[in-house]
Image: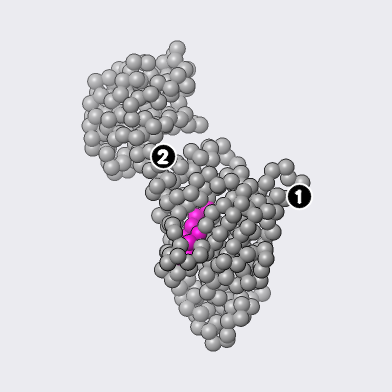
Amino acid sequence: MASSGGSPPAVEVTDLVKRYPGCTTAAVDGLSFTVAPGEIFGLLGPNGAGKSTTIGILTTRLRASAGRALVGGIDVVGDPVAARAQLAVVPQHNNLDRSLTPRQNLLYHAAYHGVGRAVRNARADALLDRFGLTDRADKRIEAYSGGMVQRLMIARALIHEPAVLFLDEPTNGLDPQSRRLIWSRIREMRGRGVTVVLTTHQMNAAAALVDRVGIVDHGRLLTLDTPGNLVKGLAGRSILDLTVTPAALDEPDELLRALSEVSGVRKSERLAAAAPPGAVAAKLRSGLGLGGGSGFGAGAPAALTALTALARERAVATLAPDPGGRERVRIRLHLAADPAAVLGPALTVLTTRLATLTDVHIAEPSLEDVFIGLTGRDPR
């Protein structure tokens, strides 16, 4: 996303490096990206990828080992005081002053940033209303739920009207109602011209919210683009999940290799655990269609027709009960073609190799598929 009207980036990171004492690897290792004014930018990555360290440097809480970081055109190392006037940050953990009421937290924060009395009182009233906190503005913070605390922290960050807002996991552990309200308010910030940089593990929400995504791991930028372009370019057109039991003399990796060679398959992978046999196979055997909750995507009617016909024809080979002693495996095929065009050849491979199909699932790829594909499935 280019800067609007030729204006400089709201955030500019160039060859940023952060090394902690005693660590053999850098937490941030040559990271570079820009964020345009008014853009919502998602910085995504696994735990320990360097996201929070990057936010810490940009908000002047940490000092970079090398590289350059600008916020609102101001070098965060060269002039941290001026940089802090341009930004606000909402950390992962509650850092509200518990000796103050919610309203007082807002007013004291505004006063710290030099906002006059009349203006800060008016802004506090408006923000408390926007975040649904007016009725409890003068109660003790200890009585606040997690969602209310998070809303108050965002309101506090906005009261001095920063140009750039940094949100580190803003909806982590919140109930759905609080998450929806916070995402809605973040969208409103874009309309007000506020630049937002956020980290989150909630991929679906990020895909619907952000303008661009940068995915980092081991302190390095792996990819950067719009969510739509990333999904289209890296995850494929659709996903076909097959739960199968290989024949007695067949190996799962060999079966995976054979399925990966089917025309229209862009990439194949073996998932860590097999899904239990569901109702899909039974319904296919009896020729029944599936309802909206099946997980089948936009190509469902054609895909189901093709699969049902082939399943009827080859029921003995592909939908028979699992042979004893063989472990089910779950195989994911990322498709570059319509699922209906791939199902037939995939079933032919299974039939030829005497594999047993116990479940099938067709879905649209998501930002999470891109994330997993780039950073791996192993937990951190």
Locate residue 364 relative to residue 79 in the image: left or right.
left
User: Which disc, if any, is residue 21?
Assistant: 1
Whether the magenta-drawn stretch holds residue 36 is answered as yes
Q: Which of 358 and 367 is in front in this view?
A: 367
Most distant residue in the top direction: 249
Q: Tell me the residue that label 2 is attached to.
A: 235
Q: Position of residue 130 (x, y in %)?
A: 45, 73
Question: In the rendered view, would you say 138 is above or below 228?
Answer: below
Whether the magenta-drawn stretch holds residue 292 is answered as no
Locate residue 86 relative to residue 208 in the image: left or right.
right
* Quadrant position of residue 279: top left
Q: Is residue 188 visible?
A: no
Q: Position of residue 36 (x, y in %)?
A: 48, 61
User: What's the magenta region?
Assistant: 35-43
Task: Look at the numbered disc 2 and give the secondary structure of its residue.
Answer: helix
Q: What residue is rendered at 50% in x and 83% in y?
A: 122
